[in-house]
Amino acid sequence: MSAVAPVAEPERQALPGLAGAQALGLTEDEYALIGQKLGREPNLVELAMFSLLWSEHCAYKHSRRLLATLPSAGERLVMGPGENAGAVDVGGGLAVAFKVESHNHPSAVEPFQGAATGVGGILRDVFAVGARPIAVLDSLRFGDPSSERSRYLLDRAVAGIGHYGNSIGVPTVGGEVYFEEPYEQNCLVNAMCIGLAPRERLIRSAAAGPGNVVVLLGASTGRDGIGGASVLASAELGEGDAAKRPSVQIGDPFAEKKLLECCLELLERGLLVALQDLGAAGLTSSAAEMASKGGVGVEIDVARVPLREPGMEPFEIMISESQERMLCVVAPRRLDEVLGLCARWETQATAIGTITDSGRFRVLSDGAVVGDVPIGALVDDCPLYDLSPRPPGAQVYPAPAARLTDADPGESLLALLSCPNLASRRPLFEQYDCLVGSRTVCRPEQADAAVLRLPAREDAPRPAIATSIDCNGRRVACDPRSGTREAVLECAANLACVGAEPLGLTNCLNFGNPEKALVAWQLTEAVGGLGEACRALGIPVVGGNVSLYNEAGEGPIYPTPVVGMVGELPDAARAGGLAFARAGDGIALVGPFAPALAASELARLRGEALPGGLPAAEVAAVVAAQAAVRAAVRAGVVTSAHDVAEGGLAVALAECCLAGGVGAQVSLAGRPGGGPDEALFGEGPGGFVLSGPDDALRALAAGATPVAIIGRVGGERLRIEHEGEEVVDLAVGRLAEAHRTLEALFS
């Protein structure tokens, strides 16, 4: 075959040129580089393929060099970055696959389908490696809930998540939602999926075997989603976003359920050479990435692709992001068996191409060549850009509106419990099925992390995994490095409170325009903090996602490096909960907790501007405290465990009371913090509230971790003294009433 194959004459007559390239998001220099790689001008099919694979969403051209600095090796690692999902070994011959991804821009344009297809896409990433999805978590950000736009986005995004997850039968077991003004125009919808598989059944996406058949599985291809994730996620939002709605994919969870079961049976029978999700950039990215990983070439004939609507052009077929589709490689002798099994699952399966030894991606239309590109040029030769980071010289984000004037500590506690960022998420979780699959150990808001049972093992307690997803964008905005470290430590703290040891981390880096010095600095510092925290915990980053250009005319979002973590615990029956449960139990504050009001939720309610930094945390001491808490929970010697997070110690105590329906009496004499506000509502990593027998709590003090018994469980009120003065005295029922304010958003 010649280095540059003949291309069909009709395509040569309509070369798009530089203007066409720029309309597709390429720069003048990138267009010139494409010409150099091809030895000629690209035609429309080729240019469309390059524009998507060289987009920010697919190529990570502003972040790839940074991501390479993250730790990605570990004893338990089975699959790392570069595959559809990462995976870790959890013993018993099993591996857990997991990943988090964004669907921010599509959700800002059409929130129901954007969020729904975000769930569908992350499910496919997990079963593409051969793992059965067993849980979903979501991380959401919206503007102030009093705004009509934010209410609309919240309502429709939550409905979309519930629609897809509930319909396909995968439980939504946890997540988080924040409301902050910088997300008003750019909501964030991040979805995380966890899957389980026999370790030996995991499959990689590298194509192999010239002569093998490329088979398209699942739904027909349509114009919905053309350039959806790849184009929408590679530019800032602005006026005219309503016109982008056709770029948002449309999901069908029932079709995906059949596709899921079909793919897992194909893998169980050993019928596939490789399997890949059709996500951003559709056939172009899936086929090119499979060929690149395998060091082979590929031919696709678009005339064989089943279409949902007639008259689609070859370039449309190649870049459509229609949902519920997978691409697989099959040996010719197994093709009939594959097609027969797909027919039994009522899953469309069509042979559309062939693996070659050419190293090129050839696109055919009924046999005529309409595109011919070197695989390496598409996948590996996208130019990577160095960032030009510069810290801000002035306040970037305006101070929030003041919602709380001078108030006594009791009124401040009620205001915090009722604010949208801390109020009960039950109105959201009740729209999700958290129990389907019968693995869920406890419902959302019963524990700091979700816990899922693993299959029973002979002559041993039934093991489990735990998972959490977290980030406080406001704190990251104050100090990107420290704030990101805190997000990782918070995730690990949540796992410690249920007795789980972290095994690996996935991340979704949500930032503004990286071509701007401020955002480049935020991103660089955040990735640095992420790596530092992972090394301190001894865990690898198994994969993730980058979502940039999250800004509009009002400026960038808070930098939001969402982290998801998976850990293991040896006995599901001993998973820790956060509820105070036994009257008479002692209450201990454990860990190197140094509360500060800077960037706290109370400071936000008071309308205070963000400070220019965060107090430095002793990471090693925080990690040691997590180990002590984890050991106590695993040993079954404490009744409850809950970390101190947003809202500080007083909110953590109130949440423990609310979960157990019981009161507590607490004295903070001699505790860290100056005045009562700082002691009660100051924030920072490293603090845990544990309850249990006094001797068990005192035993924790045998190590180097600070432990102080500060109170006792019992009664119907939360009473808190500070330096001998009672500063909070509230009935648990009054706390519960304040905590239910989000119900009005879904009434």
Image (tube, rainbow, N blue to C red):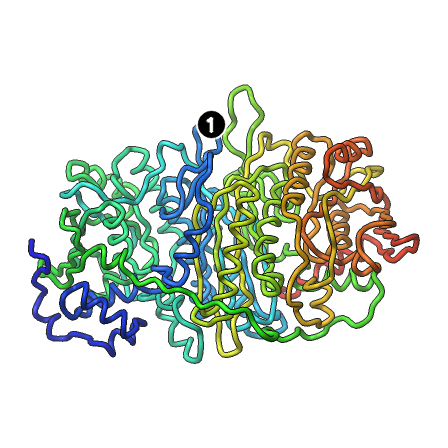
Graded by Cα atoms within 10 Å as few (under 14), some (14 to 19) or many (20 or more), the crowding at tag 1 reads some
Look at the picture and state if 508 lies above or below 434: below
Write the residue at 44% across / 62% down: 547
For the C terminus, the image quarter is bottom right
From this view, report whether residue 400 is shown above or below residue 537. Answer: below
Left or right side of 104 for 363: left
Asked whether the viewer can see residue 304, the reply is no
Residue closest to the far top: 459
Residue that extends furthest to the right in the rendered view of this protein = 724
Tell me the SS state at disc 1.
Answer: loop
The x, y position of residue 688, in whole percent, is 72, 45
Q: Which residue is mark 1?
A: 92
Q: Amino acid at mark 1?
A: Gly
Q: Nearer the viewer, residue 615 or 545?
A: 615
Name the residue at 63% across, 31% down: 573
Q: With 453 as the anchor, is 7 left or right in this view?
A: left
Measured from the top left, where is residue 408 in percent x and y?
85, 65
Q: From the viewer's perspective, tell me whether residue 218 is left or right of residue 156.
A: left
Q: Residue at x 33, y 39 (%)?
A: 203
Answer with the quarter of the image where residue 388 lies. bottom left
Tell me what residue is drawn at x 44 percent, y 63 percent. Answer: 114
Q: Compared to 735, does 111 lie above or below?
A: below
Residue 190 appearing in the image: yes
Query: Hey, which quadrant is residue 127 in on the image?
Result: top left
